[in-house]
Image (cartoon, rainbow, N blue to C red):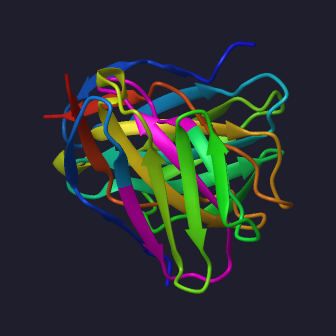
Amino acid sequence: QQQVKQSPQSLIVQKGGISIINCAYENTAFDYFPWYQQFPGKGPALLIAIRPDVSEKKEGRFTISFNKSAKQFSLHIMDSQPGDSATYFCAGTFQGAQKLVFGQGTRLTINP
Amino acid sequence: KAGVTQTPRYLIKTRGQQVTLSCSPISGHRSVSWYQQTPGQGLQFLFEYFSETQRNKGNFPGRFSGRQFSNSRSEMNVSTLELGDSALYLCASSRTSGGPSYEQYFGPGTRLTVT
């Protein structure tokens, strides 16, 4: 019940296009869903996060869409740029645990 | 504000040895979590410390241990190293624990290679 499943494993998008990464979770006790961006040789960097009482959150070109009934959430990157090429991880955690359960990651490549 | 720092950044050890990794959280952050990242298993939670107490623990053998000091700095130790322990070890800090989930901020990691 702890799993977070992420898809696709890899994604290639043309510059200016929309990148979409999907995640599904099992643990209904999860109350916080962050997305992290990781560049080679670096630690994951917090990108954007959402709580299950909100259906959508937007920060700049990044949007999280959340479907509580389906236990799914997704990251949309609008106007994708070559600098967005990185590995993206979704995660879930539950109140007080401070224990992130990560998806397997998506390697995103934006072609110029 | 300085970010999470981890030392050393790279480490090569021999099977059977032990290793200690260090993490300094963001100033004011009292919760420190450790994660192991490998290509096969991805990012996996090791344990979390808050106020010098281990609050949560992942599914790792007892060879993996940690501690936290009064200034919130944390160390993790791996004894009797195995080849499979080769990984990037990441430390993350957050403001609190035991309450609403807060953002975790990661350090650059320590790359451990076991030969």
Provide the major secondary structure of the magenta segment: strand
Please tell me which residue is depicted at 84% across the width and 45% down the height of the picture: B51
Toward the top, the furthest residue is B1
Pinpoint residue B58: horizontal percent, then vertical percent.
Answer: 51, 65
Please tell me which residue is depicted at 21% across the width and 48% down the height of the picture: A11
Please tell me which residue is depicted at 57% across the width and 38% down the height of the picture: A46
A86 horizontally vs A14: left or right: right
Pinpoint residue B112: horizontal percent, then vertical percent.
Answer: 30, 32
- Residue A96: image quadrant is bottom right
- Residue B105 in the magenta stretch? The answer is no
Q: In this view, does A69 lie above or below B66?
A: below
- Residue A39 in the magenta stretch? The answer is yes
Please tell me which residue is depicted at 80% across the width and 33% down the height of the picture: B29
Res. B80 in view: no
Magenta region, residue range: A21-46
Q: Is residue B31 above or below residue A54?
A: above
Toward the left, the furthest residue is B115
Which quadrant is the C terminus of chain A positioned in?
top left
Q: Is residue A16 above or below residue A5?
A: above
Most foreground residue, A68 or B80: A68
Res. B75 in view: yes
- Residue B31: image quadrant is top right
Tally of numbered discs:
0
Pinpoint residue B76: horizontal percent, then vertical percent.
Answer: 53, 40
Most foreground residue, A103 or A70: A70
Pinpoint residue A65: horizontal percent, then vertical percent.
Answer: 56, 61
B31 horizontally vs B63: left or right: right
